[in-house]
């Protein structure tokens, strides 16, 4: 009998990607064939994000695209958008099943054989409202383990070590759709890392909503986790995906600096370069503390790669405040920025602040910061020229070139050689092109 085919779309963060792959592995275990989302399929699973308004609209566009190619497909929508606005998602034309934060890890208990119900013909669903199974977020306490280690992707795996958030940033909906901060035991995660190593992966990225808060409810700490993971044989690199500045402690920085396995790379969200905006955002640090942290990292690891998230156009961000914040960002020895325009989310405190910034102004400010990011990344990469760096080559060949990353998160282009894929090689950096360094493997 021909296998049923399933396709997946994952929106948003690396944590979402790891969870999507975890769900994918369950489909494989039950005999489904996983196909690219551009192909026709019997089942489509969309794991959504809701950080911005555009993330919500992305879900609608994907469902429309899916049904154009596979009008009879059974469409499942889960993730943060589904948890936050289940009835709105269920009303999207073509959606058959909506699952919340807890339910997505038990998808087969709710799918009822993936049969489109009566009243849903040819994907039109003109009068059909998708079935909804979404527990109140206060009732979601299980962790929902996930990793992205799947056959055929042998280089980097994402390992979920934490979920939820206890913070109350004024612009953020994540605590309302992910629930309280929670994490499994260190022993459990060490065992999962051993399994990932056994599958042939060389790098593991630790992911979560608020990774630095690991163990806060389980009498553990991130530092204890890092020390335990370093002992896992077979994994050459561990990378921390993102960590709040107030949780990147001196002890963690010193440990990473001394470690032979943990990457010399931190992604430390800043969100804004002006103290008055940070206070309105309800962030747990100020610009002085952030600057001191970045300088401390650089003192211990001069070559460390440091990235930062920045939100432009937060309510009350005047031209003067933006320019002051921009100057602060320019002064930091960081490597790159991830720039986001503020998106008002219903139910958040900032939605009632007033002082909204014109969308065109947001666009101009975003472009300015992206130009700063491009310049900083170029300068950071340029300082690598003439150095021999260790690069983990990925199975991503384009026009005779392959690519990989250094420990400090420099993307390197090299001549393609299948013998080097999934291997950490010594590479001489010979030049810089756009956002990429150019290198030559030293045999």
Image (cartoon, grey):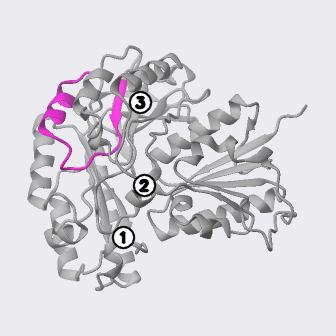
The reply to whether discs 2 and 3 touch (Cβ–Cβ < 8 Å) is no
Mark 3 — residue? 204
Neighbor class of circle 2 (other Cα within 10 Å; few <14, some 14-19, many 20+) is: few
Q: CA distance from mark 3 to mark 1?
A: 32 Å
Neighbor class of circle 1 (other Cα within 10 Å; few <14, some 14-19, many 20+) is: few
Check residue 7 in the rendering and tell me which mark sits there, or answer none: none
Give the SS element for disc 2: helix
Earlier residue among tags 3 and 1: 3
Q: Does residue 224 sit above or below 143 in this rendering?
A: above
Residue 303 at what x, y percent from top left?
21, 37
Q: Is residue 399 visible?
A: no
Earlier residue among tags 2 and 1: 2
Left or right of 327, for residue 363: right
Q: Nearer the viewer, residue 152 or 192?
A: 192
Q: CA distance from mark 2 to mark 1?
A: 39 Å
Left or right of 379, for residue 198: right
The reply to whether discs 3 and 1 touch (Cβ–Cβ < 8 Å) is no
Magenta segment: does it hold 5?
no
Magenta segment: does it hold 244?
yes
Residue located at (84% from left, 56% from top):
72
Mark 1 — residue? 367
Mark 2 — residue? 138
Residue 126 at what x, y percent from top left?
80, 73
């Amino acid at each position: 009998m021909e296998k049923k085919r399933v396709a997946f779309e994952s929106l948003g963060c690396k944590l979402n990607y790891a969870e999507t792959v975890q769900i994918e592995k369950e489909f494989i275990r039950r005999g489904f064939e996983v196909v690219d989302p551009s192909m026709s399929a019997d089942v489509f699973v969309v794991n959504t994000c809701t950080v911005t308004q555009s993330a919500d609209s992305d879900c609608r566009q994907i469902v429309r695209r899916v049904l154009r190619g596979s009008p009879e497909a059974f469409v499942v929508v889960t993730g943060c958008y589904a948890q936050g606005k289940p009835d709105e998602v269920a009303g999207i034309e073509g959606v058959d099943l909506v699952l919340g934060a807890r339910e997505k890890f038990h998808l087969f208990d709710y799918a009822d054989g993936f049969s489109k119900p009566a009243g849903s013909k040819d994907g039109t669903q003109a009068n059909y409202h998708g079935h909804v199974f979404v527990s109140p977020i206060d009732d979601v306490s299980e962790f929902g383990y996930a990793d992205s280690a799947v056959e055929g992707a042998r280089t980097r795996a994402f390992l979920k070590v934490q979920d939820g958030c206890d913070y109350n940033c004024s612009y953020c909906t994540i605590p309302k759709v992910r629930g309280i901060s929670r994490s499994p035991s260190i022993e459990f995660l060490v065992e999962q890392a051993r399994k990932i190593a056994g599958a042939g992966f060389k790098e593991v990225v630790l992911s979560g909503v608020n990774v630095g808060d690991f163990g806060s409810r389980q009498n553990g700490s991130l530092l204890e986790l890092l020390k335990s993971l370093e002992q896992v044989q077979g994994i050459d690199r561990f990378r921390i995906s993102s960590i709040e500045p107030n949780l990147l402690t001196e002890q963690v920085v010193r440990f990473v600096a001394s470690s032979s396995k943990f990457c010399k790379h931190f992604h430390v969200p800043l969100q804004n370069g002006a103290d008055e905006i940070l206070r309105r955002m309800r962030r747990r640090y100020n610009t002085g503390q952030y600057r001191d942290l970045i300088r401390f990292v650089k003192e211990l690891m001069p070559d460390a790669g440091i990235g930062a998230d920045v939100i432009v156009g937060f309510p009350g961000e005047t031209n003067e405040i933006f320019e002051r914040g921009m100057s602060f960002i320019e002064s930091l020895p960081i490597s790159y920025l991830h720039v986001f325009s503020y998106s008002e989310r219903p139910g958040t405190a900032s939605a009632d602040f007033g002082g909204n910034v014109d969308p065109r102004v947001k666009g101009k400010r975003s472009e300015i910061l992206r130009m700063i990011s491009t310049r900083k990344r170029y300068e950071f990469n340029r300082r690598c020229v003439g150095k021999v760096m260790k690069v983990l080559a990925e199975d991503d060949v384009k026009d005779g070139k392959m690519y990989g990353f250094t420990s400090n998160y420099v993307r390197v282009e090299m001549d393609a050689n299948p013998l080097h894929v999934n291997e950490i090689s010594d590479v001489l950096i010979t030049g810089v092109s756009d956002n990429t360094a150019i290198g030559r493997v030293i045999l």
